[in-house]
Image (spheres, rainbow, N blue to C red):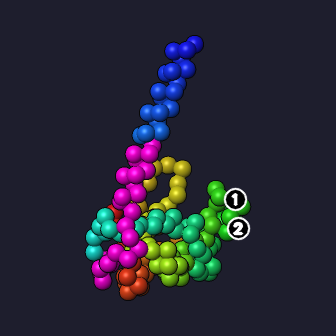
Amino acid sequence: MKQLIQLMKFIIVVFLVTTLTLVDVGQAAISSPNAPVGDNLGPVTSRDTIYQIVTDRFVDGNSNNNVPEGFDPTLFDGTGEDLKLYQGGDFAGIVEKIPYLKEMGITAVWISAPYSNRDTEILDYQSDGSIDRWTSFHAITPEISLKRISILDL
């Protein structure tokens, strides 16, 4: 029994040391909000503070596109109560909240792609219409760039 307690204590100590080491390394990677930002959509560097945006969950900036033509309206919630359904966030909402992101010291955004959410694997990488089309994404990138926020392009 005593050996089991010693083993458990050892495991807990190793876990805590590993966790604290990883947190410390992660803290070192976080940049200063005052880090200079390029004027274009150039590469994101280790000095950037990146904010990941899941587009549909972020901000609904254009309610006119919440239920596009041909889209099953029962798949839209928009209240945040049923998170299995679409919530209405869109690219217009991202542009609207750039000042908020800048206030937090964000220098780059990683925006989720508008792929179809299917029960099967994605084979064609086409938008399903629940989020603005790719053309809307390409239209907002200059707006975001002008506000001195980079876009992580994977």
Q: Is residue 87 above or below residue 136?
A: above
Count neighbours of disc 1 (C-alpha within 10 A) and say few if under 14, some if 14 to 19, many if 20 or more.
Answer: few
For this view, does 48 lie left or right of residue 103? Answer: left
Residue sitting at 30 percent across and 83 percent down?
Answer: 39
Q: Nearer the viewer, residue 106 or 129?
A: 106
Q: Is-magenta flag for residue 4?
A: no
Image x and y of residue 63, in percent: 63, 79
State if disc 1 and disc 2 touch (CB < 8 Å).
yes
Labels in figure, total: 2
Q: Is residue 15 above or below residue 126?
A: above
Res. 132 in view: no
Between residues 140 and 17, which one lies in front from this camera angle?
Answer: 17
Q: Percent x, y for residue 103?
A: 50, 79
Amino acid, disc 1: Asp
Where disc 1 sits, the SS reads loop
Q: Which residue is mark 2?
A: 79
The residue lying toward the viewer, choosing from 48 and 70, is 48
Q: Is residue 57 in sight in this rendering?
A: yes
Nearest the eye: 83 or 1 = 1
Residue 34 is a magenta residue: yes
In the rendered image, which quarter is residue 56 located in?
Answer: bottom right
- Residues packed near mark 2 inside 10 Å, few (<14), some (14 to 19) or many (20 plus): few
Which segment did they paint magenta?
19-41
At 57% from the left and 13% from the top, the residue drawn is 1
Q: Residue at x 47, y 27 (%)?
A: 10
Quarter of the figure with the C terminus: bottom left
Looking at the image, residue 39 lies above or below residue 154 = below
In percent of the image, x 40 and y 68: which residue is there?
Answer: 49
Q: Position of residue 121 (x, y in %)?
A: 45, 50
Residue at the disc numbered 1: 82
Residue 148 pos. (x, y %): 37, 82
